Image (cartoon, grey):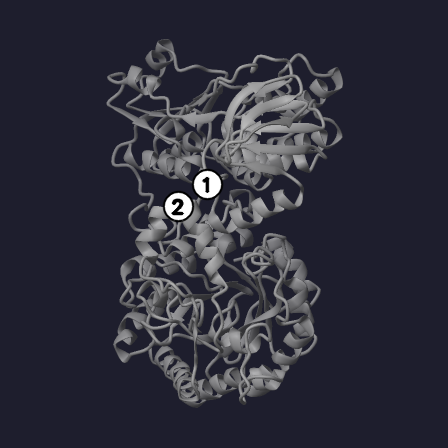
Amino acid sequence: MEVNPRYRKLFEPGRIGTMELKNRIVEAAMGTSLEREDGFVDDRIKDFYEERAKGGVGLIVMGVGAIDHPDGKVLPGQLGLSDDKFIPGLREMADAIHRHDTRLAIQLQRGGKLSTEDMCHGLQPKSSSCSALPVQEAMQDMASVEIPRMMARYTRMPAKLETVELTLAEIRDVVAKFGEAARRAKDAGIDGVEIHAGHGYLLSEFLSGACNRRTDEYGGSLENRARIVLEVIAAVRDRVGTDYPVWIRMDGREFGIAGGITTKEARKLAKLFEAAGVDAINVSGYGGFRGGFYDAPLCYPRGNLVSLAAGIKKSVSVPVMAVGRIDAALGERILRKGKADFIAMARALLADPEYPRKISEGREDDIRPCIMCYHCVSQAFWGEPVFCSVNAAAGKEAELAIKPAAKPKKVLVIGGGPAGMEAARVAALRGHSVTLCEKGRRLGGSLFYASIANADNEGFMNYLIRQMKKLSVEVRLKTDATPDLINEIKPDAIIVASGGSVAIPEIPGSNRHHVKTGKDLRQFMSGDAGKFDWWWKGGMFIAAHVTPFLLRGSLIRWFTKVWIPMGERVAIVGGDIGACELADFLVKRKRKVAILETSPDIAVEMAIGKRWNFLQRLRDAGVIMLRNVDFKEITLQGIKIVDGEGKERIIAADTIIISGSMEPSRALSEALKGKAAQVIDAGDCRELRLIHGSVEDGYRAGLAV
């Protein structure tokens, strides 16, 4: 098959040691917790990886294979490599992946002080050297967000969170277990192994000067700190031979960690690993939970770690993998410029397993994009199975497989938000005749406004809109679900995805001219309000009616950089995810912002990993965030409150925004009962679902028809 010439380098064959790969796209290892807690392969994890093999990726690296299972685990579900009893299941996995001309590797990993599963069972984790756990503060942060879930999992965690230093005998035991784990992978027919020496786990603890405080031959100089990793490489080679592909994942830098691995040290380490016999180097990064965790390994800035890979590639002759929020276009540029030899992706393939095939066939418009919400990553902190906000079938491939309907039906979808469009997409794929009506003049629903505040959402919204056209869904804008409409269409099934209603708290003085509500903001963003300058309304008219959907949110963000009708000081009543993203939007437009929340938590709906960074970014920008607030009165000078300490104060503000809270609204679905054989609720009209819940609701509704 002819490959899209725009991605010629991505689809060139490649080689790691003796292993031939059909292209340069690697599925990076990720912790999914889809595996069984006893370490065995089952259908759920096999389906997950096989779906991605079908999508055309060249190499899959299965995440965090536990070399010392059950000790040293970092997730409840990790594939076991500590006993020969695991080999038959791993062989089944390899056979399933090989059916699709994809190679399979497994990551060899041992958690040190980040061995949360040891903590959960009342054990003191083993580490390179004794130290208080850096994860302690993160655990406390998670507990403050959602105490019941934390308490259910971490009740047995030691009160004094300190690690136990590995003895020399234990180091030799760990080294031997890495070697035996690699031998089992080879015996199972797996094509290669990746030694995990990054991301704060045991081997990286030895490498990092910030963590390693040993005074014996495993501490001190860089060569001493690398000793255990070099011994692991030697043990692996001894057990699998010289012709079996073995490579290492390492940190090209530690972000925000005083005394951590520097880029200069990482290049020296890479040379040592190459001399020890690895066939490739996968360059990632790590960061402290408060200083750089969002720079690496979560990597919010796109391509943030590429320079680290490029630096190491200059220092070694073996192939180098680059990772870190890299899409196909960026990956192609990286390969053409010689900065890396392979491109590793994780979240992009979680969002769309067919990403490589769609790229190779020139179907970029059909790619379901990751929105960088980080719910997938955050699931690991809770020890729960991974899910994807935009791909409801991730981790549920068999349960949520899209199959042709036994009998095509007429389906009416009410509401053009994420739940409605996803329901229409799935129903149309199954062969139903779908009509979608939306009372507004554009598709997107609340996702349209979310995409203005958060640009990552815009790509997903545009993907859904394109699918409506490609799948021949009849879209009727500015159309209410009236009895006449129902009589005209005569649907066999109705999916109600009309969204929720916003409850605005009543505060004395809320009718003043400088007070705005969510409705006002939507009018502002849409360009519908008559009280704004003519040039603004004209610009918004162009954005809404002339410019293609692809550019709408982008243009609005550009216009609002020039002018927004708000004072210099803005107080936001409410602290949910929408209010906080609005605060971020306003701060970037030079406004001084205060967030005022009645409950103890702010942005509780946000994924925990993203929440750490997001709230810290708001603090750094000078945003005032007050919890447990009681509102007294809105005055011309600002808003009078009683703060969490019981003190009455005035928050000065030129503009006050009352964001309100979303509440379910089932009146329409109740009124439609009996109008069709099936009436199904989906999204916020059923309960507060946000993007990930709305997408899953819509997906399941499309399957249920």
What residue sits right under mark 2 in the picture? 146
Residue 129 in percent (x, y) is at 49, 78
The image quadrant where one finds the C terminus is top left
Residue 381 in percent (x, y) is at 42, 56
Task: Give the camera-side residue of 496 and 165.
Answer: 165
Task: Give the camera-side residue of 178 and 411.
Answer: 178
Residue type of the residue flagged with mark 1:
Val
Residue appearing at x 49%, y 25% in the figure: 660
Quarter holding residue 637 = top right
Q: Is residue 34 above or below residue 110?
A: above
Mark 1, other Cα within 10 Å: few <14 / some 14–19 / many ≥20 = some
Residue 457 in percent (x, y) is at 55, 39
Q: Is residue 279 above or below residue 452?
A: below
Q: Is residue 598 above or below residue 202?
A: above
Residue type of the residue flagged with mark 2:
Glu
> Nearer the N terminus, badge 2 or badge 1?
2
Count of number-bearing discs: 2
Q: Which mark is residue 446?
A: none
Q: Are marks 2 and 1 in contact (CB under 8 Å)?
A: yes
Q: Secondary structure at mark 2?
A: loop
| Residue 616 visible in image | yes
Q: Is residue 539 left or right of residue 376?
A: right
Task: Give the camera-side residue of 634 and 313.
Answer: 634
Residue appearing at x 38%, y 86% in the figure: 173
Residue appearing at x 47%, y 20% in the figure: 505
Mark 2, other Cα within 10 Å: few <14 / some 14–19 / many ≥20 = few
Q: Secondary structure at mark 1?
A: loop
Q: CA distance from mark 2 to mark 1?
A: 8 Å
What residue sits right under mark 1 in the picture? 604
